[in-house]
Amino acid sequence: MSSDAIDRKGQPDTAAPAAIELRGISKSFGPVQANRNISLRVPKGTIHGIIGENGAGKSTLMSILYGFYKPDSGEIRVNGTPITITDSQTAIRSGIGMVFQHFKLVQNFTVLENIILGAEDGPLLRPSLAKARGVLKQLAEEYQLNVDPDEMIEELSVGHQQRVEILKALYRQADILILDEPTGVLTPAEADHLFRILEGLRAEGKTIILITHKLREIMEITDNVSVMRRGEMVASVKTAETSPAELAELMVGRKVLLNVDKAPATPGDPILEVRDLKLVDDEGVERLRKISFDIRAGEILGIAGVSGNGQTQLLELLGGYPEKGSKVSGSVRMNGQELDLTGTKSDAATRRARGIGHIPEDRQVEGLIMDFTAWENTAFGYHRAPEYNKGLLMDNAAILADAEEKMEHFDVRPRNAQLAARNFSGGNQQKIVVAREIERDPDLLLIGQPTRGVDIGAIEFIHKRIVELRDAGKAVLLVSVELDEILALSDRIAVMFDGRIMGERIPDQTTTGELGLLMAGVTDTEHTPASAGIPPDHRHVETLPEEPA
């Protein structure tokens, strides 16, 4: 079914000249039909959103447009001219640039070296670098993409690395820019800055195609939006004439609950008790500064904060794999018994044996082995469980059957446990990790960014499972840069800044503005923290030290 057959109102202006036009595009990978007879029209000088569930075919369609895949059938027109895009170089010569969800940057190269990589003017690099430096300065000033050209990529924040990717495309004179889930790894402030950049590009006549699952972003930044479902284009509308609820229903094919539905928590005994936890990394930087908190059975404690303020180190330490060379002090009790923080029983396997599950922040680095199959990944960390073994040998058939059941339960697509993890979309990779950890029924679940890069239907499902775990009397420590997610799921919210807990709040007694101030290190000593379950001498509402950290 093509979009032309079902556009029903407010469709993009067909009289306006099109920067991109796709006609009847289809693409299969073996038995999997990724795109089916897709037609799409993107007017010049607009921001066009493309949304859909994980596995809907969005990224495949854009990879066809950028020359990574060749369509089985159909036609591509750029600025009205039919064109065959055989590879990414053809796309670049046609004025198309793409910023991928997982950046394509060389980490130990400088910004300038990454900008010219693949676009050198000749065998001598010095003239290319000199030219690029001048062009880069002009582009950075024009589009608010300021970044130090001599900085190493590995030393840049994720938001600045994304700027480099955009500058790469603009340096190659792209008039059409495709961004695949661009805010999946950005803080709210970085996402807002990106939107200002995109608005500036649109004002200069550039055309933007934005692939995202975040309906708030679609409503905020796009002119038009197209919805994909199961490889087909099901609607194309003007953004101003639709709503988040309607788009969600079009994406999933049913009504979607956009708000988390949960009863008030009924906390029980403390599951996790953290006292004066301190961590200094191998370079002598204090990442955790005497943190104290409790989590009780049957409650969710959300940790809010800008990425890089100690949340990652907290999860890794509690999960049993702090950075090598780090020094740890303080105490952590799990179900009333002390956890080993530095000795031989401080590893992740011991943590799992004590009833701690962990959904890490980076699914590809810490949650999965990308070259291993889905069924193998569903058993990692639990491969010594009795149900997975027959005597001295692992029972692969039992693991495979269990993986297929998990994939069915968590709607992992495609439903093929024999595929390597890298062959799944980012959202479906996340579902594999979530299924593995939640299905083990842990007493304490550590969660880092549970719905990063996950579509609206899967977000609803994952949120329900987290609440179900809480209602079953389990404790949940939730770390997320999405304030909406923190506010919706948490029973209590602790805010981290510079390795400290700056204060605690009850979700329905605070605002995003107040949380934002705490995230920036601005404290309000007159506001009483909602520190349920924490002894008074361990409550943290403090001012910053006068000396630099």
Image: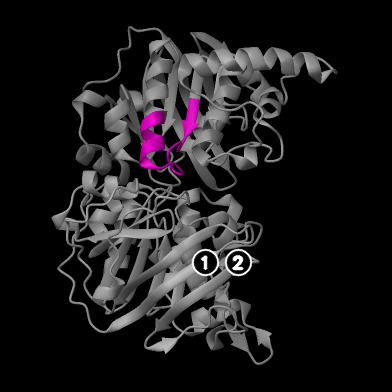
In the rendered structure, which segment of residues is drawn in magenta?
178-193
The percent position of residue 283, horizontal first and vertical second, equals: 63, 57
Q: Residue furthest right?
A: 123
Q: CA distance from mark 1 to mark 2?
A: 7 Å
Q: In what quadrant of the picture does the N terminus appear?
A: top left
Q: Which residue is mark 1?
A: 279
Q: Amino acid at mark 2?
A: Ser
| Residue drawn at 62 percent across, 30 percent down | 70
| Residue drawn at 28 percent across, 37 percent down | 216
Q: Residue furthest front?
A: 546
| Residue drawn at 20 percent across, 52 percent down | 259
Q: What scheme was used to colour the molecule?
A: one colour
Horizontal arrangement in the rendering, residue 74 relative to residue 533 (left or right)? right
| Circles 1 and 2 in contact, beta carbons < 8 Å | yes
Q: Amino acid at mark 1?
A: Leu
The percent position of residue 386, horizontal first and vertical second, equals: 55, 88
Relative to 414, residue 320 above or below: below
Q: Which tag, 1 or 2, sits closer to the chain's start?
A: 1
Relative to 305, residue 224 above or below: above
Horizontal arrangement in the rendering, residue 126 relative to residue 181 (left or right)? right
Relative to 471, residue 239 above or below: above
In the picture, the disc for residue 326 is 2
Q: Residue furthest bottom?
A: 391
SS under mark 2: loop
Q: Nearer the viewer, residue 254 or 463?
A: 463
Query: Is residue 434 visible in this depiction of the protein?
Result: yes
Relative to 324, residue 208 above or below: above
